[in-house]
Image (cartoon, helix red, strand yellow):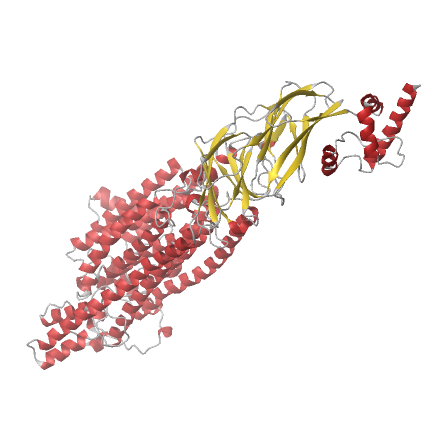
Amino acid sequence: MLFAHVYAVSRYACAMTSRDAASGQYQQTTGERADRHRHGRTGSRFHPFNGGRSQADDGSRMLRFCPVLLVLMLPACGASVVIQRDAQFDVTYDDTVTSDNQTIYSYNHTVSRNKTEGVRVSVELLSESAQSPVLFVVRQKQAVLSFQVPLILRGLYQRKYQYTQVGRTLCQPPTKAEAETQFFYVDVSTLSSAGVHYQLRVSRVDSFTLQTDKKFSFNATPSQPQFFKYMFPDGVDTVIVKVNSQKNFPCSVMSIQDIQCPVYDLDNNVAFIGMYQTMTTTAAITVQRKDFPSNSFYVVVVVKTEDEACGGPLRFYPLLPDQLLDPGNRSKTLDVIVSPAINSEVYVMGMLFCLGIFLSFYLLTFLVACVENKRMNRKREGLLNADTSPAETASLLGKASVSPYEYGSFADNGSTLSSEAVTDSLASTDGNCGCMDRSLESVARSRQESLSSVEEDDYDTLVDIDSDKNIVRTKKFLCVSDLARKDKRILSKKYQIYFWNIATIAVFYALPVIQLVITYQTVVNVTGNQDICYYNFLCAHPLGALSSFNNILSNLGYVLLGLLFLLIVLQRDILHNRALERNESTALECGIPKHFGLYYAMGTALMMEGLLSACYHVCPNYTNFQFDTSFMYMIAGLCMLKLYQKRHPDINASAYSAYACLAAVIFFSVLGVVFGKGNTVFWIVFSVIHILATLLLSTQLYYMGRWRLDSGILRRMLNVIYTDCIRQCSGPMYIDRMVLLVMGNIVNWSLAAYGLIKRPNDFASYLLAIAICNLLLYFAFYIIMKLRSGERIQCLALVCILFTAVVWGFALFFFFQGLSTWQKTPAESREHNRECILLSFFDDHDIWHFLSSIAMFGSFLVLLTMDDDLDTVQRDKIYVF
């Protein structure tokens, strides 16, 4: 009779249980469980006879007085036995779970508003072959954490790695009370019919809150991630979080997350929120208080299941899609330290330093101009007091007052003089001027004619002129006068196109670049993915939305010094035009022909290099590295063109053909970055094109453009070889040119062979190295031939050469420090990161920006002043080489 009654009660209880479960009311809330625990009531909620009382109270009373009833009731409805026990911290519970029973461990601890105490749950599965995993559910007041053991984590290509040891730190939401006792429960269940043996241990984390400037060491694995809390101290608005390890692998991830639950601390979800970056030995993230309203954040460290993201190898590929792989030993020891970052005073000091160092060049240029002007005035007074006739003095002063050469005052008046002008006048008085006295009316044309009506082809339309070119340009010894026969106004207009074209290119190139890098920075800020950009994270100072303001600021030198160079060129251009308007013989017949269009293009290119380098450093990576190098190619090309134009003004390349060649170079640069990495076919094709271009350019330079590329080129080549090498052994007609071209071919063939054999990953830098090597070779040849021809280098140009050489040496030293490299993975690149070395604000690469901008400015001044010694030498006495 009793058994029948119990059976009826159990069936009724099963029905009630099914109803409550269907309506979503069977599961107790965390607050209800905690309330009943405080009043001594535990157990299930159902009871067959209400009697006006709550089901929870009746069920609790029934379970307290009739424990056997629960055992009889649950099997009747197919449910498992629920066992709840009070548990203690730092105690290891060795237990077994099956599908027929469920164990609930109840913990309580005191939560303080001013102190955060970490709690860590560690589980180990002792059964070797379990039919089903064991599910652990940790229920807190405001959070729920669940995981299974063995834990299955996926890698690339759907690889599955199994972990039988799992450790998780519980999220600790803040409390408003001064002190509060909170309960949390660990539910253990499984669907395995066989018993699964496990160990459970819940412990307190003593060093859960990180202290400023105090290093803390810990271990982590893929199934046992770690996270810690940091609170901003008073007066500190920015900190830098650094995580270091002694070994590269296993690969790991460092994440900065807000204080909220849940904390994403597994390999498959760590990238969901916050900022994160992969790491091998070093990771660093700069964190600002304004991004975290709670004035605190979590530092999460996760070890990845595989090392491919950090540049490590993939060991093998699973043969079966559902095969579980042994992860091996992937434990990693790491150190974390949180240090205050720089304050606003350091930002101001860095900006003032950057402005001061480059504005000082403006001041230095002004002082040099004043000194030269004063020196010129003293020589002018000496001329006035000299023992000369009044007519000679007046003639002498008339010539000196309009000299266009060297640094004079930046004033507009026509009385501006330079030291070179007075020197020229003194030389004329002694009868040593190279320029012959001739009728200026027969030489100079009227300057009133409109330039728009003059075309370069006006000179070349006559057939006899074309034959004259073949005669003149193939002479064994050429003078500048032989290659400066075209009208100066025509050539000036031709070379001004260089400036207008590069200005147009700059506008169309820069606007999309700026738009793109702003998008890059927005993506980084929104996604928090710090692996997109290759910064020096140990010295990356944010400002506003910019992540590395110091790398952007240091490019200011290119812009300011490029502008200064344009002002110097403009001053020289104005003085030279005044001399032409006065029909000065020195401006018309002496020295290297003055064409300033290429100088304007060089100054503009230097300014654009600064702007685009700053854009590149907004988010440096391999896809936008061409922003940093495109105008470097242009600067190298323009400098070579200017060197060649100095003594070959009539036959220098036009702006259209020059920029078309530079566009081809940039095109190959893009192809090399995208397809060149390890692509043998690409390197073969590029090396062949490189060698053919070198041969064609060598032929063009050797014959001064007096050759044709047509169907008869092979016949003419064989004829030359037979005549000069077989029939009669004769040396080259133009020995100097041949020496330069042979050296150039050796260098370029060697570079082509190096690229074909080594196939460097950084194709853009390799291409830039080719341009720089050719520029340095041509510049060295020019200097050597200048001195060999009996010419001299004036003091100002010599100072610029020595100063520039020294600065270039220091600049290259800092360039090769290699603080980051996009040729590797972001984690490997961070291994090269270093601390700031200047004013706690600038790193080695910033110093490279400073020094390289100064060195480029000095190189431009060398090109501008190198031939000033020839300003009084007649052009038919200046040799071409």
Nearer the observer, 641 or 189: 189
Q: Quadrant of the N terminus?
A: top right
Q: Position of residue 564 (x, y in %)?
A: 32, 63
Nearer the observer, 83 or 67: 67
Residue furthest bottom as drawn: 390
Residue furthest left as drawn: 387
Residue furthest right as drawn: 1
Q: Is residue 794 visible?
A: no
Q: Position of residue 426 (x, y in %)?
A: 12, 70
Q: Quadrant of residue 749?
A: top left
Q: Is residue 375 left or right of residue 266?
A: left
Q: Is residue 108 left or right of residue 393?
A: right
Q: Quadrant of residue 831?
A: top left
Nearer the observer, 438 or 33: 33
Q: Is residue 414 left or right of residue 852?
A: left
Q: Quadrant of the C terminus?
A: bottom left
Q: Position of residue 138 (x, y in %)?
A: 66, 32
Q: Is residue 616 left or right of residue 110?
A: left
Residue 225 vertical placement versus 866 (above, below):
above
Residue 511 vertical placement versus 247 (above, below):
below
Nearer the observer, 186 or 567: 186
Q: Is residue 634 visible?
A: yes
Q: How many marks?
A: 0
Q: Position of residue 78 (x, y in %)?
A: 82, 24
